C-alpha cells in the first residue's frame, strides 16, 4: 500500500527520534530499569499537568483510561452528570450506562462548547461527579475546564476530564483548575505511538477511589497504587511505547511548557487563517489548538475529498464521526507539526478544492 503522512487528530505524525526510541530492547517490567523508566514518565507528566498527586500509567487507548475513571471514581449510589458536546462526551455517557449508572445529561450542539451556567444550574440541585472533555476531538471545540473546576468545587462535586486530545496543546493544569481526575494518552500532542494512557487523581479523588464499589479488574486503581509503590504496573505494560512516550515528553520539556503551548497556538492560528482565506467556515465556536475542523458546503462530501487527497498526494486528513461524517474535514496539528509542514498540506487541500 502507498504510504501517507498523517494530518489526523490522533494518531499523529510521530517524530523520528521518538520512533527510534521505541526500537530499543525491552527491559523486564519487574526490575530497576523499568522503575526508572516509569518514574521518569510520571515525573514529566506531573510537570506538564501541574499535578502533585498520583498518576497511574495504563496499557490501553484513551478509552481505557476513561473506563478506569468511571469504574474507580463512581460508586453505585453516586450521581453522575455528563456534559456532552460531541462523540467523546457521548462516550462518557456510554461508559456510565455500561456500569448501570443513569447519568444526568448536559448537552451542547456539535461545534458548541458546554455552557458553564448549565453546569452550575445542574450542580445546584445537588453534588455529583461531572464528566466532560477538554478538547472534543470530533468537533474541535474547547471547553472552559478552569470555570468548570470553580463550579464543581463550589458545589462539593468532582470534576473528571477527558484530556486525551488536548493535553500538551491546550492548557489544563490539574491543581490550578481544580480537576479531580484527568486522563490522557500517548498518541496525540505527546508525540508517541498509540498504546499508553494515564490517569491522574487529586487527593480527594484518591480517597473516593478507595471506597468505590463498581466492578473492575484490569483497571482497578487500588491495585495500580500497590504496584506504583514498587515502581511497577500490575500487568505487563507496552514497554517500547513507554520509551517513545518518554522521548516525546523530553522533547516538550526541552521546548518548555509555556513555549510549547504558544507554539500550538501559533500553528492553530495559521491554519485557521488559511482556511478562512479559502472562504470555508470553521465548525467550533471556541476552537482547540489541537485541530482545525472545517465545515463542508452542501455540494461537497469530505469522504471523497479525503480519499482522493490521500491517493493522489499521500496526505491523510480526518473525516467527521457519526452524523458529521462527510460534512466536515478535520486537520490535526498537535505535537509534531510545524507551519512549514502544514503549509504544504493546506496548499494541496486548497489546490484540490479549487479544481473540483
Image: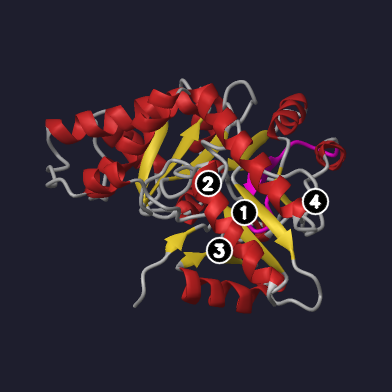
Number of residues whose C-alpha sits closer than 10 Å to that of mark 1, classed few (under 14), some (14–19) or many (20 or more): many
Q: Secondary structure at mark 2?
A: loop
- The percent coordinates of residue 124 (x first, y second) are 85, 35
Residue depicted at 14% across the width and 47% down the height: 26
Residue 170 screen position, x and y as percent: 60, 36
Q: Which residue is mark 3?
A: 317
Q: Give the vertical position of 37 relative to 139 (above or below).
A: above
Q: Looking at the image, which residue is at 38% across and 54% down?
A: 194
Circles 1, 2 touching at the beta carbon (< 8 Å): yes
Please give the residue where the numbered disc 2 appears in the rendered image.
Answer: 164
Find the distance from the CA under tag 4 to the CA under tag 2.
19 Å
Work out whether 39 lies above or below 93.
above
Going from N to C along the chain, the mark reached first, 1 or 2, is 1
The structure's colour scheme is: secondary structure
**Mark 4 and mark 2 residues within 8 Å of each other at the beta carbon:** no
| Region of the chain picked out in magenta, as a range | 125-140
Residue ID for mark 4: 112
Mark closer to the chain start, 2 or 3: 2
**Is residue 95 in view from this perspective?**
no
Secondary structure of the residue carrying tag 1 is loop
Per the rendering, the mark at residue 137 is: 1
Which quadrant, please, contains the C terminus? bottom right
Amino acid at each position: 500500500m502507498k504510504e501517507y503522512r498523517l494530518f489526523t487528530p490522533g494518531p499523529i505524525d510521530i517524530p523520528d527520534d521518538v520512533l527510534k526510541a521505541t526500537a530499543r530492547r525491552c527491559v523486564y517490567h519487574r526490575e530497576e530499569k523499568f522503575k526508572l523508566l516509569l518514574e521518569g514518565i510520571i515525573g514529566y507528566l506531573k510537570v506538564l499537568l501541574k499535578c502533585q498527586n498520583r498518576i497511574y500509567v495504563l496499557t490501553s487507548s484513551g478509552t481505557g483510561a476513561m473506563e478506569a475513571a468511571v469504574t474507580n471514581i463512581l460508586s453505585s449510589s453516586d450521581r453522575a452528570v455528563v456534559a456532552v458536546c460531541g462523540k467523546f462526551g457521548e462516550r462518557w455517557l456510554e461508559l456510565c450506562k455500561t456500569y448501570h449508572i443513569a447519568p444526568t445529561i448536559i448537552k451542547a450542539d456539535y461545534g458548541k462548547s458546554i455552557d458553564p451556567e448549565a453546569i452550575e444550574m445542574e450542580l445546584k440541585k445537588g453534588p455529583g461527579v461531572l464528566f466532560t472533555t477538554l478538547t472534543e476531538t470530533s468537533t474541535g471545540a474547547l471547553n472552559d475546564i478552569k470555570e468548570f473546576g470553580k463550579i464543581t468545587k463550589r458545589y462539593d462535586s468532582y470534576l473528571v476530564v477527558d484530556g486525551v486530545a488536548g493535553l500538551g496543546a491546550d492548557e489544563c493544569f490539574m491543581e490550578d483548575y481544580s480537576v479531580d481526575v484527568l486522563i490522557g494518552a500517548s498518541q496525540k500532542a505527546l508525540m508517541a505511538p498509540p498504546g499508553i494512557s494515564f490517569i491522574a487523581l487529586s487527593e480527594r479523588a484518591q480517597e473516593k477511589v478507595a471506597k468505590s464499589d463498581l466492578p473492575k479488574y484490569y483497571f482497578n486503581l487500588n491495585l495500580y497504587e500497590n504496584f506504583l509503590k514498587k515502581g511497577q504496573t500490575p500487568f505487563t505494560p507496552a514497554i517500547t511505547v513507554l520509551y517513545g512516550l518518554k522521548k516525546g515528553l523530553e522533547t516538550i520539556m526541552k521546548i518548555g511548557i509555556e513555549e510549547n503551548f504558544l507554539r500550538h497556538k501559533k500553528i492553530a492560528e495559521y491554519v485557521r487563517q488559511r482556511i478562512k482565506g479559502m472562504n470555508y467556515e470553521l465548525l467550533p465556536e471556541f476552537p482547540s489548538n489541537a485541530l482545525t475542523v472545517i465545515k463542508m458546503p452542501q455540494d461537497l462530501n469530505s469522504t471523497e475529498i479525503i480519499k482522493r487527497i490521500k491517493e493522489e498526494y499521500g496526505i491523510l486528513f480526518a473525516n467527521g464521526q457519526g452524523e458529521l461524517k462527510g460534512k466536515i474535514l478535520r486537520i490535526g496539528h498537535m505535537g509534531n507539526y510545524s507551519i512549514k509542514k502544514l503549509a504544504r498540506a493546506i496548499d494541496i487541500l486548497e489546490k484540490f478544492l479549487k479544481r473540483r
